[in-house]
Amino acid sequence: MNHYFFLLKQAWGSLRQKPGFLVTVVVTMGTTLGVLLCVLTLAYLLVLQPLPYPEQDRLYNVTHAMGDKSKEAPPKAFTYPGLIHLYKNQQLFEKTALLQYAEDILTSLPNQPTLNTGYVTPQWFELLGATLKMGRLFEQTEALDTFNPVAIISYKTWRQEFASAPDMLDKKVSFSGVTYRVVGVLSKEFVEPQINQVGKDVGIWFPWDYNFDVPLKESWGYMSPASIFVGKLKVGVSASNAQQRLTPLVNDTWAEHVASIPFFSGWSIKIELEPFQTVVMGESKNTAFLLLAGVLGLVLIAFANIANLFISRTAEQRRPLAIRAALGATKSQLFRELLAESGLLMLLSVLLALVIASLGFSLLQSYMSSVLPRVDELRMNTITLVAAVFCAVLFAFLFAFLSRRAINYQTLNSMLQSSGKGTGVQVSKLFRQSLIVSQVAIATVLVFVNISLFKQAIGTITEPTDFSVENMSQISLAVSASQVPPPEEVSAVMTELKKKLLELPQVESISQSVSVLDRFGLRALIAVTSGESFTLESKHVSNNYFQMMAQPLLEGDYFSDTDIKDGTQVIIVNDVFAKQLSPDGSALGLQVSPPSSRDRLTIVGVVKGVKMPAQTDIPMRVYTPLNLAPTQMTLKLQEGQSITREQVVSAIKGVSNLYALFSLQTLTEVKQRRLFTQYTSAITTSALTFITLFLAGVGLYGILSYSTQMRRFEIGTRLAIGAKRSDVIKLIVKDNAAMILLGMLTSVLVLLALYLGFNDNLNAYLSNNLVFVFVLTLVPIALLSLFACYWPLRKYINQPVVHSLRGSD
């Protein structure tokens, strides 16, 4: 043991004399391994680590797919009464829970914050094994149809909104005119499954009875996309068996209630079970694998670079090594000395890597919590530490082994007699060529992949839209009452509020409707002429909606003031739906009908279909006249102007105290949030591209610098007998061009293998101009290679020839 300590002490003394080598190795390897450890921990969390819920392998999300036989992808949404029927009558789940997400204003606090809310039956927290900071969970006194106004708040809400009040269980909170008694505060350790939207944590939980879809309890023909059914299957019951037995339970009852509605003729319901793990994780596994592949490529490049530095370091130590060999040191003893030095460097590198990994966890939690699930659970764990130790040991042995392979033990003794001009330490030509090929191949693959992903992200971000969001903001109001006032009263208040807002100098116009970026509802319609049924997206809009949003009108007319005031039975459709109704002619004048009504809606206009940010296609859409009662508005502002929350709140208070400002945001912000994934992808891939090119450049420079140094006598001789500087440059470039081209060819084979092996997963990332992207990739790789060939050569061709001939600088 004392001998090993002596070797480490000796290695540290030697490294201190080469601070440049020490810092370069530790920073390069530490940074690379830090990123690797961060991504490895993330990948383990997303791919392998079980969810932190008891018996999570028996937890399932139940989906309700409703459509006719022609629907390839029927909408997955419950009808409210069908959901309740399933909840009360199923016999296959040990426990079940109903869940719905929303947002609401906490009006009992002075700052009236908007919180994410959740409405659940008591079994929800039992399924998750939830723990509490104080109080209790929901009980049977808060079960379905009990209407007991109590609430449970999250730990984060307790800290941020109530300043960690110790008397929280004595407080009450008010939402939408209903006052709830707080009965519990969830613990800090509770991890909420984000099955609705990644990064959207619920701030306060209410009993199911207070959800917003309760008025739909008799509407068998209306789908409720916001409702979720979760259950734990009984032991011995498989998911496939449960699907087969639950489908008739729901479908038969639903068919009985909609038998009188012609629209649903031929329709059916299929119950499907999705593992809870799949629902929570989504497509994050693919993201984890892509990140891991990119980081492993960087590790390989960094390894090649550091290996070259170690070999060069060994070459510098040829005289001390020769002395130890002459004194009787064996090959294994020399290896242990080299291992002590590489081990010490890897220890320092891993310590730095752990620090960088921790910083990486914080960055991911700050910027990726709305993209990747479970990011808030990231922390240093056993996997991180085991991977760190494994990397330290593996790379220490690899670098020591490569350094040992560079030593010609038999000729070390002769170096003492030849003043160090022997060949005791020399890297073989084949090894150097292998390093060049691997560097170029790995760099080309990584840069190509990153440029492809960057191009796709930028293409989505900059894709032109057939609508405008410039200088626009949207506001949404909440009613501070248990029941919404009659439409006539709301309409009068909203009309007065519009006048108040239009008095502001920065407001140009107002549309009393949600913005073009807000989600659409689902609606069922029947074509009166053909009898064909359609399920399409629908939105209520004001008479000036399309003009404000700059959505082109292709034929017909917009809604008139009379259509808005009297609720005329007219609609406007997009060109996608118009072509479905009338492939060879105009859709103007055609009529459609809701399935449970005799009303006839006449098409008066056709607008151009618009694709939402990050969408891949344009669905069929219809627009109907909006009355004056809704509490959402879109404001178009003067060029370069903005509106503050205080100004809107002041205008609302000047009209009525019954309303509170729910949200105020610019449409540019809304669009950027929709494109958050694309912005993140663009930033990440561009950073990885530059890091890859930098590491590849350093590596190629190191390899070719060593090769050039080995040929300095040859270079001096050529210059002495009359060769021009350009001739020498061409010679070095020509000698290395074959390996560089071989590296590029190897990258093509690797990319082809990836395509053939993962065709289904990669199709979404492929485009028609891959050849152009590949050429764009080769340009910086080629320039780096030329630079790496020329730069080490310049000191030999720019100095007197005698220096090269006598082997001194």
Image (cartoon, helix red, strand yellow):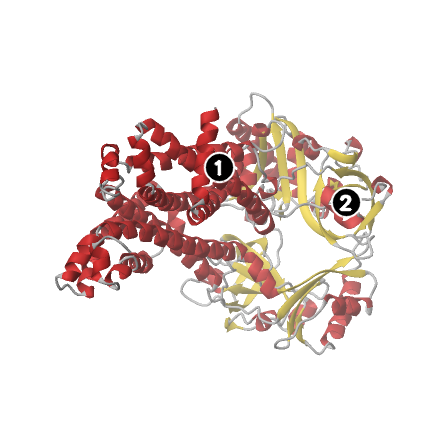
Which residue, given by chain and number where applicable, does mark 2 sit on?
A: 158
Q: Is residue 525 above or below residue 285?
A: below
Q: Residue at x 22, y 36 (%)?
A: 414
Judge the density around disc 2: few (<14), some (14-19), many (≥20) Cα neighbours within 10 Å. Answer: many
Q: Earlier in the sequence, mark 1 or mark 2?
A: 2
Viewer-proximal residue among 105 and 273: 105
Residue located 55% across and 55% down the image: 525
For the question of whether residue 615 can be seen, the reply is no
In this rendering, the count of numbered labels is 2
Looking at the picture, tell me which residue is in the foreground, 559 or 452. Answer: 452
Mark 2: secondary structure: helix
**Residue 497 place in picture, x, y as percent:** 76, 70
Q: Quadrant of the C terminus?
A: bottom left
Question: Which residue occupies 26% across, 35% down?
Answer: 412
What residue would you read off at disc 1? Answer: 347
Quarter holding residue 332? top left
Pick the residue in front: 244 or 124: 124
Q: Amino acid at mark 2?
A: Trp
In the picture, measured across the screen, residue 254 lies left or right of residue 167, that is: left
Taking depth in this image into account, of 436 and 139 the one nearest to the observer is 436
The numbered mark at residue 318 is none
Residue ranking furthest to the top: 236
Q: CA distance from mark 1 to mark 2?
A: 42 Å
Q: Residue placed farthest to the left in the image?
A: 721
State left or right for residue 331 relative to residue 201.
left
